[in-house]
Image (tube, rainbow, N blue to C red):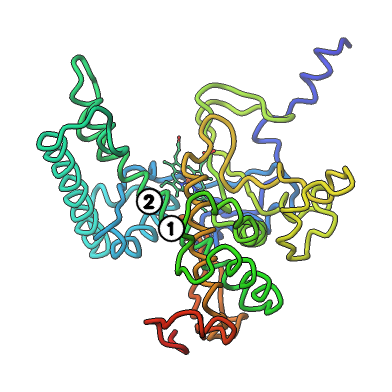
Amino acid sequence: MDAAASSAQRLRQVRDLPCPRGLPLIGNLHQLNAPKLHRVLEQWAEELGTPYRFQIAFGEDPRTLEQERGVIQEHLAQIFPMLMHRVNAPFPYWRYVRLPRDRRTDRALAEVHRTIRGMMARSRERMRDEPSDAPRHLLEAMLALRDAPGSDVTDDIIAANVLTLLLAGEDTTANALAWSLYYLCADEPLQQRLASAAHAVLGVHTVCPDYGLVKDLDLFEAVCSETLRFRPVAAIMAFEPVENVQVSDVALPAGSKMFFLTRPPMLAARHYSQPGRFDPESWLRGHAGGDARVHDPRAWVQFGAGPRVCPGRHLAAMEMRLVLSTLMNRFKVKLAADPSTIEEITAFAMVPSRMPVRLALRPTVESFQPQTNQPGRD
Ligand code: HEM
């Protein structure tokens, strides 16, 4: 047998992959608890090894639902759970009958679309009334492209891109910060180190006063990066090949739904010599001693990879640095709940069920400047 024939024999088809036991017709659907989806998938990965398959009649493309923000924020709570619900629905019932929750979502979506159209109209007015040689922001750049001769960009396309940016940028970063507080609350010495680092850069200023100083806030981004290793807000990444492909030793037909779990490799001993230890400083040490296993950032794919890598990753890093340094410069943080009651929820991003945190002014910095914030506020 030649090498090609032997490798063809080793190639597995999707049907050859291990699969959790399911029920007739609905497959594994009843086991896919949407708020705990990432945990269910991680559990199956442990039990079956990877890759594995599961069976479910996917109802719809998540994009049948559009999303929101701004006013938008208040609608997120409505829309994200519905998005998860529809992704996992056995069939797209909402095309035939609209339940009260579908109508609530419709209203939230309509509101979001109105908000975005308003943003677009305001930008257009400004472009007309205060012309500028170059676009002042991304929305203006998109509108200029739409208005260029021969352009096939439409207002709908721009609105969809605005939505993507708002959605992709908000919940991810906000919940990365929320999970970071969870670890900070449990680690007073780390809080102390961060307070000193923040004070060295911010001094009496409330927020980092100069763009050039942001680079001195590495430890704050490191805290978020390390947090995301344990609590990935992007816990599941979904892909669908547009043509037949081979991934590792598995043949995948075009259109196969693939889910990649990001946490298992980030907690694997082959990438981190002490994978269970919360160690933000390891992000600053890098490959100490030349041993990549000590800390292998390539296993950390919270922003994805390749051509569709998150375009907002640098903005997110900047936000993490600024928010945490602002907080740590002035306050001690304490969790106002039993940590064991805080659950992981798949709500598009993997978010904490809640994160009540008590802030207290740091005695060592109290004398810097009077604050409007009151100590002891939640
Ligand atoms: C902690 C914060 C964030 C995390 C963990 C995160 C994670 C991700 C991931 C995993 C993807 C998919 C990558 C892939 O398909 O390979 C993505 C895409 C995207 N992200 Fe982020 N993101 C964050 C913050 C942001 C911010 C602040 C923005 C912008 C304001 C943003 C905008 C986007 C957009 C527009 C896409 C779609 C890119 C495309 O499909 O070409 N993200 N992000």
With 345 as the anchor, is 97 left or right in this view?
A: left
Tag 1's secondary structure?
helix
- Tell me the amino acid under the disc marked 1: Asp
Residue depicted at 53% across the width and 37% down the height: 309
Residue 328, label in figure: none
376 relative to 185, above or below? below
Q: Which mark is residue 167?
A: 2
Q: Tell me the CA gap for discs 1 and 2.
A: 7 Å
Please give the count of numbered marks on the rendered protein.
Answer: 2
Which percent across, then down, holds residue 98?
Answer: 23, 56
- The front one of 233 and 209 is 209
Residue 206, position as x, y percentages in the image? 45, 69
Residue in the foreground of this view, choosing between 113 and 278: 278
Dots 1, 2 in contact, CB < 8 A? yes
**Quarter of the picture holding the N terminus:** top right
| Residue 40 shows up from this direction | no
- For residue 42, side relative to residue 240 (left or right): right
Check mark 2 vs ligand 1: CB closer than 8 Å? yes or no: no
Q: In the rendered view of the protein, which quadrant contains the C terminus?
A: bottom left
Which residue is painted at 65% across and 34% down in the image? 14
Decide: is 333 above or below 234: below
For image coordinates 73% across by 30% down, the residue present is 248
Near mark 1 (Cα within 10 A), the count class, few <14, some 14-19 or many ≥20, is many
Please give the name of the residue rendered at 54% of the width and 33% of the height, measured from the top-left corner.
Answer: 256
Give percent across and percent down for residue 201: 57, 62
Label 2: state its secondary structure: helix
Q: Is residue 159 visible?
A: yes
| Kind of residue at disc 2 | Leu
Disc 1: which residue:
171
